[in-house]
Amino acid sequence: MTKDSSDKKRRQSAAGILLLGRVVGILISVLVNVVLARSIGAEGLGVFTLVVAWTAIAGLVVTSGLPTLLTREIAANIERRNYPLVKGIIRWSGYLITVLCILALSLGAVLLLLQPDQESRTVLYTVALGVAVVLPLASMLQRISGILRGLDHVVWGTLPEQIFRPAFFLAGLSIGALLSWLTVEHVVVLYIGATVCALGLSHLVLMQKMPPFVQSATPQITNRKWMMALVPLAGIALTATFKHQTDIVMLGFLGTTSDVATYRIASQVAALAGMLMVALNAVYSPKVAALYASQKLGDFHSVLVKSARQMFAAALLTTIIFVLVGKPLLVLVFGPEFEVSYLYAIVLMVGVIISAWCGQTAVVLKMTDHTKVVFRAGIEATAINVILNFVLISTMGPVGAAVATMSALIWVQVRQLLAIRSALQMDISAFGGPMRKEYERDE
């Protein structure tokens, strides 16, 4: 077996493991929410959801695309055998996260002191305490993930956040639920403990996987170059995080913690409708990349349309099943408080269906050197999401948040689909017809 075929087989195996890990991660997350909903109710789940959402927002200040930069720079410099730069960026990233954590937590303390409403401070203090402790731990966890991926241990790089922390958290919650002592404060403490355990385990993995030639190298740091490289990566990370957290955070401001909890459950259910879409993205992406690289654009277009049709069919079928049995299922699994999540989930699923119909738009644009379109569409969608959330939550509550999020998702996908039609003269949606012959360049 040649080296190239061996590498290809190894990467295909890694892709399969990553896909399985993502599915397992989603299932663990669903189980976590079941235990939380049954143990601390909608009010407590809402408070915990705000801790997670604000940690993600605060993490923007701290990581700002750093894991991606670590992966890219470490992989490139190992290929060039420039081991001093590899060790340098690993050390530099630790210093940077430490400084930014101090700045972010100082800002959070100031905002907390300025909060005038005494009645809301119980929730606020719980959220602030959780964020203050989890933020540096979660940031270091992301840093280790970026380093491991850069060292070509992609599977190990995804495990800390996708499997390790959720699994430790679920184990702690299950024990707490059996002992009947769970409160929202206990849940936050268990989440902190799960993050510590995941960080410790990930650090051990990193020490085991770190090449000796990197460990023995004298670190070389190019501070200015790396800081400049972080700017565009931070922009992409910013739009991605706000896209996922805007609705939750604004519901926390404009609604109640119970609204946040019922909406979180709806979001998880909608994510299940898109689970096959995520899986197919992982399966098809390597094949699509190979076809584009070989300039077999007819096959490239055909594979993309096929994947879009499968995504669309899966999302539509999941939504139809949920429409038929979703309401009693929500009550049975999560409790009567979460029956209202049924309507929110259906609205979000409409966005998933249309997104699936559009196909792998972001993958194609990034692959064909149109990354700026993805970035611009993300910024536009974030603005739409914020404005619509602000307007609609006040009048419609969580339904308004669902409509805003659905609208932003549809905008991104349709905007990117139209960009592909314009730039590449192809329709990759589920209803896309055969590619016009004059644009095919099959070899």
Image (spheres, grey):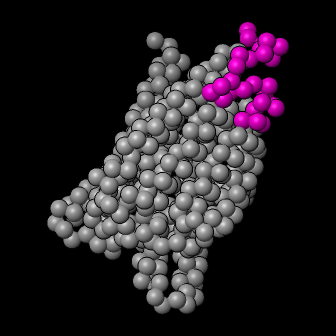
- Who is closer to the viewer here, 350 or 83? 350
Q: Is residue 86 magenta?
A: no
Q: Residue at x 33, y 72 (%)?
A: 184
Residue 332 location, x and y as percent? 28, 52
- Who is closer to the viewer here, 33 or 214? 33
Residue 103 location, x and y as percent? 59, 75
Which residue is situated farthest in the front direction here? Answer: 324
Q: How many marks?
A: 0
Image height of 307 relative to 244, above or below: above
- Quarter holding residue 307: top right
Image height of 63 relative to 7, above or below: below
Residue 401 location, x and y as percent? 57, 60
- Who is closer to the viewer here, 222 or 234? 234
Q: Residue at x 54, y 66 (%)?
A: 397
Q: Is residue 334 left or right of residue 417?
A: left
Q: Residue at x 28, y 61 (%)?
A: 38
Which quarter of the figure is the C terminus placed in? Answer: top right
- Quarter holding residue 181: bottom left
Q: Is residue 412 visible?
A: yes
Which residue is situated farthest in the top direction here? Answer: 443
Q: Is residue 434 left or right of residue 167?
A: right
Q: Residue at x 68, y 32 (%)?
A: 364
Q: Magenta stretch: give its range.
A: 417-443
- Who is closer to the viewer here, 39 or 16? 39
Q: Is residue 430 magenta?
A: yes
Q: Is residue 63 visible?
A: no
Residue 354 location, x and y as percent? 61, 39
Which residue is situated farthest in the left direction here? Answer: 179
